[in-house]
Structures are given as C-alpha cells and as structure tokens.
Amino acid sequence: MALLRLLFKTARLSIMRIGAGWMFALLTFNFNRITIADLGAIAVIVTTLIGMHHFISFFQVYWGRLADRYPVFGYRRTPYFLLSALVASLVFLFLPSIAIGLGQRDPLATIEAFLFIAVFGVAMAMNGSSSNALMAEVTTEKERGFVVAVIWATVIISGIVSAGVSRVMMPVYSPEAMQQLYNLTPMVVMATALLGVIGMERRVSKEQHAALLAQQPAEGAASPLGTFRVARQLMATNRHVRGFFFFVLLGILGIFLQDAILEPFGAEVFGMTQAQTARFQQAWGAGALLGMLAIGILCSVFSIPKKLIATIGGLGIVGSLATIALSAFAHRPELILPSLIVMGLGIGLFDVGALSMMMDMTIEGQVGLYMGIWGMAQGFGNGFANVLSGAFHTLFIEIAGITPTVAYGVIFGFEALMMGLAMVILRGISVQEFKGLTRREIGTVLAMDTAG
C-alpha cells in the first residue's frame, strides 16, 4: 500500500512538470533553430535571449519567500504554481510573430522578444520555486531519490515528445505551422499542471501559518532586491549555504557548458554531418535517463547517501569530459559516443543526488526561501554556461585563430575542471551541520534585512 501511494504521488509530481519540459524544448530546440537557420536572425541576439531567463532566476528566492509568507486560501505552493504556468505558457502565443521580426532584424521585435522572455523567466522562477518547494514538503528524505529521478526523467521525455510533435506538425517551417504548434502550449501546460498539482498540497490553517511566521520577525512585503539581500546574508553567515550554492552553480556549469557547442565540435573538428552529430544529444540524453531511473530504483530499495550519489555522478562527468577533450587532441572520433553515454549516466546520478540534497538543505518554515536560493544557483550556472561556451568559441577560434582541435580540447578540459571544483566543494558540505543553523540565526539575518 505504501508503495502504491509513493508511485501515485511520484506520478502526480511528474505530470505537473511536463509543461516545463515542453516549453523549454520549444524554446531551446525549435525557436532557436527557426529564428537563426530558417529566418536569418542575428545568432548572438537569439542565444542571449535563450540564456537570459536563467539570469532572472534570482526571482526564485523572492517567490519562494513570498509564498512562505503569503498563502492564498491556505495554500503556499498551488496558486503560485498555477499562475506561473499560465503566464509562462501564454508567452508562446506571441513567439512565432516575434521570430519573424527577429529574422527581419526589426529593432522593435528585438525589444519585444526581450520583454516577453523576461516575463517568461520571471514566471518560470515562480514555477520552479513553487514546484521544488512542494516536492520537498510532500516527500520524505528516503523517497526523494526515487521521486527526483522519475520527475527529471519525465521532464526529459516531455522535451523529446515536444520535439517529436514539432516534427509532425512542422516538418518544414512555415509561419502558420509554427503558430499552430505554439498555440498548443497553454493547453498542454495547464492541463498537465492541473492534473498534477490539484490536491497535492496540504492546506495550512491560519494557526499553523501564524506559528510558522512566529519563527521569524514580522516584516512588510519584501522586494526582490530585499529578498536577494537576505539570500546573500545567509550565504555570508553560514558556510554550508555558501558552499552548496557554489557547488550547484559550478556543477551545472560543468554539465551544460558543452550543450551549445557539442554539435559544432563534431562538425569543426571531425567534419561530421548533421545526422552524425545529432546522435550526440541522443547518446547523453539516453544515458541520463538510464542513470536517473537506475539510481531512482536503487534509492527506493536501499538507503544510499545523496552526497555519495552526486559524487559518483560528478566524477563520471569529469572522466567523460576529459576523454572527449582527449578525442579532440588525439583525433579519435570513436571515443565520443561512449564518452557521451558515460557522461549521461553521470549527469543522471548527479542530478538525482544534487536535487535530493537541495530538498534536504531546507528548514521548516523557510523551504521556499532555500529552494529559491538553490534554484538561483541552477539558473546562474545555466546562464553562464550559455554565455561562456559561445564566448570561448569566439575568443579562441574566431579571434585568436587557435585551431578547433586545440580550442575544443581546452574548452572541454575547462568544463571538467569546473565539475572537479564542484566535487571539492561538495566534500566540505554537511546536511546535518546545515540543519544546525538555528531559528535564532535565521531570525537575526531576516531582522538585519528588515532594519536595512
């Protein structure tokens, strides 16, 4: 019976994240390709747009704190999650016409694009903060490894399905087909959000919420910048908060720096066709799914430390990135696919371990705040990965004139170094010591923000 309840709860939590996978897939694999390849938009503007929402992730801290303090009809997660899903999905109705304007190099369309993606980023910050906090509140520590694995596997699969639907509805780009495809987004997102979230959250009574608020000093409505100051002060006063923030940031950077340059690497170093380099994403994506599901099943049977899972995954990523760098220097293309499969397995383990630790690295009454801080670290890591990969390519190959073989070897070596540094930081982090941060210390930090 307990297993059935866990499976049902995991399925509900997974369904509510399908919309996020759908939207991110359309944005990063479809919108990106159409605007640059089919419509001739300026590539750097499009890639900056794609990465911009990650840098807005500091709003996760604000939304998390706001939801902690201001429930709607007794619910601190559900209303914020549904509102954010609606706002984010409605943005996609406008993207097909914006894509045409970007292709025409229209300055007004460029401004509109940045505004709409900013709205999307703010909404997804609320969405991520709410869903992560809910996940942390309705699962036990033992359940989280399995739950996180299934949820992230679902997100990846939903992205794959989104790509498949786009191929069927729009095998060749046309404005009408793109509009029809993007019109599906609000329906897909809201249907899965409602199916997943309704009834998941336990309603907080006024008395229970008052007890939670009593654990921190009274204050007025916080601003995003004020909440960001609270996060900064918490990192300054507790080394485990600070260490875990940089562990997440460097770990995400160590995973996704390759994402935007992997296919150009195959083309520029080995002269591979697009069909050949398309296998790269499939290889590490399949490895990630296998790693997540395998460790999720193991975690449901055995009590495996989350820190150990993340460490094994991180070391696997370091080794695979080093091998890919070696394949460039030694001109050994046969090393790439096996290395990518191993990298995917490592990513699967790392994601499960790190995300499970995120939920452990919270304190009752402040779950939204801490999940927002960790979400901000994820966003910054993804954003910097997008910026640095393109910047390194331009600097090394286009400006400095370094051969692609050497340049890509250095880039992948740098990425491995980032993940290695994340592993070093992880060694010094203790969930138990973090839990030792007392209510009084939290109250002191929040009181400092109120006084400021």
Image (tube, rainbow, N blue to C red):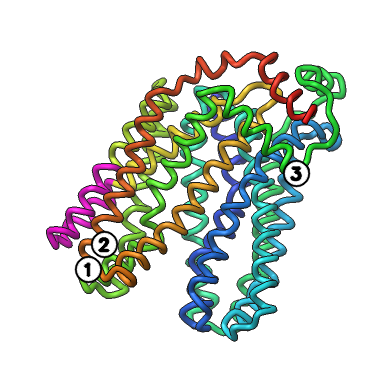
User: For mark 2, what is the residue?
Assistant: 407
Q: Amino acid at mark 1?
A: Thr
Q: Are marks 1 and 2 in contact (CB under 8 Å)?
A: yes
Q: Amino acid at mark 2?
A: Ala
**Viewer-side residue, 198 vs 114:** 114
Measure how far apart labels 3 and 1 are at the Cα level: 49 Å
Please tell me which residue is depicted at 61% across the width and 72% down the height of the picture. 181
Q: Is residue 319 magenta?
A: yes
Please provide the residue range marked out in magenta. Answer: 318-342
Name the disc covering residue 58, or none: none
Mark 3 and mark 2 lie on one chain; the one further toward the N terminus is 3
Q: Which residue is mark 1?
A: 403
Distance CA(mark 3)–CA(mark 2): 44 Å
Q: Amino acid at mark 3?
A: Tyr
Q: What x and y, as percent, mark residue 172?
A: 49, 83
Looking at the image, residue 154 lies above or below residue 356: below
Residue in the picture at 62% in, 41% down = 12
Residue plotted at (31% across, 49% down): 414
Quadrant including the N terminus: top right
Q: Left or right: where does residue 295 sit relative to residue 409?
A: right
Residue at the spot of label 3: 80
Q: Secondary structure at mark 2?
A: helix
